[in-house]
C-alpha cells in the first residue's frame, strides 16, 4: 500500500452509492480510478457520469486491446480524468498519480 494512501469507509444504502461517488468526484479533483465489479456497472456509471458532465473513460474486458490502450493514454494525459474500470480489466495496471 502506498504511504500517502488514506482509506476510509462510508456506510450507505445501495441507492446512495452513486450520490456519494458523485460528491467525492466533485469535491476532490485529480486523476481518479473507480473500480466496479461488473461490466454492466462500468457501463452504467460511465453513462451516468457522462450525463453529469464528468467525461469519464471506461475500461473492461469486452473492449479490444487498442481501445483499452487508447483510454489509458487519455486517462494519463489529463490530470483531472476519471477512469471507471472493471476489477478484472484493471488487474496489473500501474498508473502513477491517481487520487
Image (cartoon, rainbow, N blue to C red):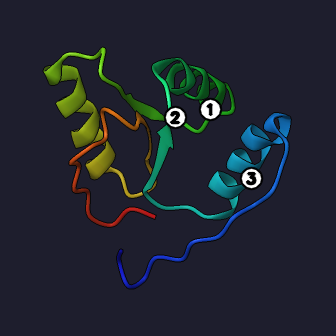
Given this view, does label 2 or label 1 mark the residue nearer the observer?
1
Marks 3/2 in contact by CB < 8 Å: the verdict is no
| Quarter of the figure with the N terminus | bottom left
Q: Residue furthest left?
A: 66
Q: Nearer the viewer, residue 55 or 5?
A: 5
Provide residue 55's location: percent of width, then percent of height: 52, 34
Q: Nearer the viewer, residue 54 or 24?
A: 24
Q: Which mark is residue 71?
A: none
Provide residue 26's location: percent of width, then percent of height: 68, 54
Judged from the image, the secondary structure of the residue bearing numbered disc 1 is: helix
Provide residue 46's location: percent of width, then percent of height: 54, 27
Seen at 69% across and 62% down, the residue is: 27
Marks 3/1 in contact by CB < 8 Å: the verdict is no
Marks 2/1 in contact by CB < 8 Å: the verdict is yes
Separation of residues labelled 2 and 1 (CA atoms): 7 Å
Counting residues from the start of the chain, the first of labels 2 and 1 encountered is: 1
Q: Up-down: is 60 above or below 83?
A: above
Residue that label 2 marks: 55
Q: Up-down: is 89 above or below 31?
A: above
Quadrant of the image occupied by residue 48:
top right
Q: Nearer the viewer, residue 72 or 79?
A: 72
Q: Which mark is residue 49?
A: 1
Given this view, does label 3 or label 2 mark the residue nearer the observer?
3
Judged from the image, the secondary structure of the residue bearing numbered disc 2 is: loop
Seen at 65% across and 70% down, the residue is: 8
Amino acid at each position: 500500500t502506498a504511504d500517502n494512501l488514506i482509506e476510509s469507509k462510508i456506510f450507505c444504502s445501495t441507492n446512495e452509492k452513486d450520490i456519494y461517488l458523485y460528491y467525492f468526484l466533485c469535491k476532490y479533483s485529480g486523476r481518479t480510478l473507480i473500480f466496479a465489479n461488473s461490466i454492466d456497472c462500468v457501463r452504467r456509471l460511465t453513462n451516468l457520469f457522462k450525463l453529469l458532465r464528468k467525461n469519464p473513460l471506461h475500461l473492461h474486458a469486452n473492449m479490444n486491446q487498442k481501445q483499452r490502450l487508447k483510454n489509458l493514454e487519455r486517462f494519463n494525459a489529463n490530470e483531472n480524468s476519471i477512469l471507471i474500470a472493471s476489477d478484472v480489466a484493471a488487474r496489473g495496471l500501474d498508473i502513477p498519480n491517481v487520487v
